[in-house]
């Protein structure tokens, strides 16, 4: 298999960032300048590059700089690669999963009309104190925020909770930014009240229990939007940076101060758990945020915080199971240390 990859020679790059301004490719980012006499960051092509060649074509067409290069990466499949490919083909032939019931619909309501009803009108004094667990996952495109939300829903439903998840996409000019919002309500409390809960579709400022941010600036954006409060919110955030377009197109060093962003997150949250998810993902796979959720201690379902329940949710998701399980353990250890 031959893959075309593009790169930038840091010794040749002048750091004017014209290629970023012209192409806008999210795989073009900033890196420290290797020249000790210069402070402006140079351009770098990260691993999300798909080898389309647009950045190099734009650069050469505009006669911007000779720093771009193209490399052909030749990879021959090993025996293990062939074995995994056979397993993937077998999974492709598996029957599709049954469609999920509408939120608030009971098991006996197939074909019948259903309407969500308020819990507050008929709850007794004990059940009136029960409130949903609210979780907001703020992630960039391609970082697995949707997969993580699906895992949390699966874990909650197998742990005796009613779960609802919604996603609100946005644009941050760095592969997009999406808010995945989940609310989990104890099924036993709904049964005791005799009513289905009405769960919100969007996070409400000041009423979010757990915020998981896949990147440091996304954590700061959650703070800015009021999702993180010192009396309630546990903030789990990565310390790595995916630079915004305004940071990358600056002629000089336009990067935001990472230390200031981290301090803002620390001051706004009840508790902050911060570690480099990108570095662990490069070493082990994905699902780092999923491992961090275990550190939150908020999902007190029947399975409590036992690892088998979390690992079972990852296996049922059938998305990069081996790498996700490895990253789950690594993320949990990093979150516990943080």
Image: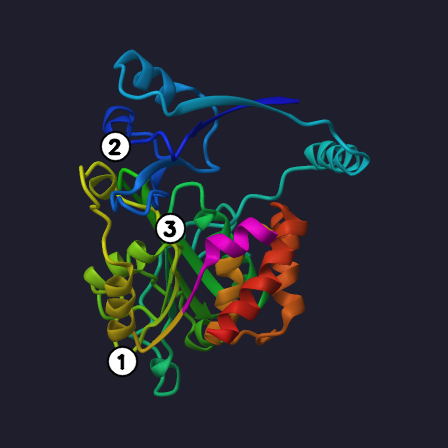
The image position of residue 149, as x and y in percent, is 46, 54
Left or right: 24 as drawn, with respect to 183: left
The image position of residue 117, as x and y in percent, is 33, 63
Q: Residue 231 carries which label?
A: 1
State which tag comes first along the sequence, 2 or 3: 2
The image position of residue 203, as x and y in percent, is 28, 60
The image's colour scheme reads: rainbow
Instruction: Name the residue at the front extreme.
Output: 37
Of helix, strand and loop, which mostly describes the magenta segment? Answer: helix
Q: Is residue 87 visible from the viewing direction of this image?
A: yes
- Quick one: 42 or 201, which is closer to the camera? 42
- Quick one: 292 or 40, which is closer to the camera? 40
Q: Which mark is residue 17?
A: 2
- Residue carrying label 3: 139
Residue visible at 36% across and 15% down in the picture: 57
Instruction: Name the residue at the bottom extreme.
Output: 125
- Residue 160 vertical position relative to residue 13 in the rendered view, above or below: below
Query: Which quadrant of the structure image shows residue 275?
Result: bottom left
* Dot 2 and dot 1 residues touching (CB under 8 Å): no
Question: Is 200 included in the stretch rendered in magenta?
Answer: no
Under tag 1, what secondary structure? loop
Q: Is residue 299 visible from the viewing direction of this image?
A: no
State which tag comes first along the sequence, 3 or 1: 3
- Residue 211 vertical position relative to residue 81 in the rendered view, above or below: below
Left or right: 279 as drawn, with respect to 118: right
The magenta segment is 274-284
What separation in Å lies between label 3 and label 1 (alpha carbons)?
A: 23 Å
Front disc: 2 or 3: 2
């Amino acid at each position: 298999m031959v893959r075309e990859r593009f790169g930038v020679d840091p010794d040749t790059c002048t750091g004017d960032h014209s290629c970023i301004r012209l192409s806008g490719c999210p795989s073009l980012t900033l890196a420290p300048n290797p020249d000790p006499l210069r402070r402006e960051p140079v351009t770098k092509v990260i691993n999300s590059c798909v080898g389309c060649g647009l950045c190099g074509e734009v650069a050469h067409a505009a006669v911007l700089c000779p720093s771009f290069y193209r490399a052909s990466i030749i990879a021959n499949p090993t025996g293990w690669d062939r074995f995994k490919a056979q397993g993937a083909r077998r999974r492709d032939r598996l029957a599709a999963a049954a469609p999920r019931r509408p939120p608030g619909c009971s098991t006996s309501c197939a074909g019948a009309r259903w309407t969500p009803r308020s819990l507050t009108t008929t709850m007794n004094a004990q059940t009136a104190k029960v409130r949903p667990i609210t979780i907001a996952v703020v992630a960039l495109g391609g970082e697995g925020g949707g997969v993580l939300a699906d895992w949390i829903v699966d874990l909650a439903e197998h742990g005796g909770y009613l779960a609802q998840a919604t996603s609100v996409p946005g644009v941050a000019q760095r592969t997009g930014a999406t808010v995945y919002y989940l609310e989990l309500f104890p099924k036993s409390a709904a049964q005791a009240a005799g009513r289905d809960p009405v769960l919100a579709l969007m996070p409400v400022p000041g009423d979010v229990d757990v915020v998981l941010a896949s990147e440091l600036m996304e954590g700061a954006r959650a703070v800015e939007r009021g999702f993180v409060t010192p009396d309630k919110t546990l903030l789990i955030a990565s310390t790595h940076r995916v630079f915004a377009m305004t940071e990358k197109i600056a002629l000089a060093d336009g990067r935001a101060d990472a230390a200031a962003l981290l301090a803002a997150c620390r001051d706004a949250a009840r508790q902050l758990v911060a570690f480099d998810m990108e570095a662990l993902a490069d070493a082990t796979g994905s699902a780092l945020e999923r491992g961090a959720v275990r550190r939150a201690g908020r999902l007190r379902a029947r399975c409590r915080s036992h690892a088998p329940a979390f690992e079972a949710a990852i296996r049922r998701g059938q998305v990069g199971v081996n790498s996700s399980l490895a990253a789950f353990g690594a993320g949990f250890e990093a979150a516990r240390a943080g």
